[in-house]
Amino acid sequence: MTKELVIVNKAAFRVEKPNICPYCEKGIDPKRISELLYSYQGSTYAYVVYQCPCCDEVFFAKYFPGYGEYDGVAYPLVVLGGQIPSIKFDDCLNEISPEFVKIYNEAYIAESLGCPSIAGIGYRMAFEYLIKDYGIAKCPESAEKIKKMKLQECILEFSPDEDTKTLWRGTTWIGNDFAHYETRFEDFDLQKLKELINLSADSLVREIKKKKYIEKFQNK
Ligand SMILES: [Zn+2]
């Protein structure tokens, strides 16, 4: 990160400039456009407005400059602006279940906005799409039947091995806790549900890629 001196209302402090544009996500040395100090709840913050030299978008960096201690360097507390946050998944998951990727990211936005209950239901829904779409990719001729199957039935039919079956079933149970009045596993929070879903997605990626390579070698 590049440091620079910012002077606002005769107060001078050094800041670390953000080095990644929140819009185009390129590594940048942004141009400073403006700055202001703002006090609330007993603390004073500096807001610096920057412009990206690549995409020309404007964004804010919020600093706590340690008002009165101008020798220190302030790091951005948060960079404000840019795209809605999104989680990227392996391309093979985008191919077999674009709905999983879409719903997972909607849940992620809900979580980012401070709605963990809604996020939990969303993550559980995303997981169901992932497993069912995987089943449909394996047996496209049974697509209509798979869509109507219970998630647990799909897991029993399509999980590649016993460990994965246990993992997927557990993920369903934890996900259900976010969708139902009574909870079965009280020590599992949203982060653990996400971890389980990500592990389940990883197991699918491994399975899909393994199968692709095996098919290539078998045809030789
Ligand atoms: Zn940019």
Image: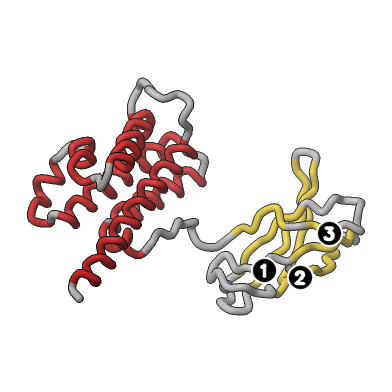
Residue at the image point whose x is 41% and y is 48% from the top: 198
Q: Neighbour class for label 1 at 10 Å: few (<14), some, many (≥20)?
A: some
Amino acid type, callout 3: Val
Which image quarter is the C terminus in? bottom left
- Residue with the mark numbered 3: 73
**Image quadrant of residue 50?**
bottom right
Which colour scheme appears in the figure? secondary structure
**Residue 206 or residue 148, whichever sits in front:** 206
Q: Which residue position is annotated with label 2?
A: 2
Q: Which residue is mark 1?
A: 19
Of mark 3 and mark 2, the one earlier in the sequence is: 2
Q: Residue at x 20, y 69 (%)?
A: 218
Quadrant containing the N terminus is: bottom right
Q: Pointer 1 and pointer 2: residues touching (CB < 8 Å)?
A: yes
Looking at the image, which residue is at 26% across and 59% down? 96
Q: CA distance from mark 3 to mark 2?
A: 11 Å
Outermost residue on the bottom side: it is 54
Q: Amino acid at mark 2?
A: Thr
**104 left or right of 22?**
left
Mark with earlier residue (3, 1): 1
29 vs 82, nearest the viewer: 29
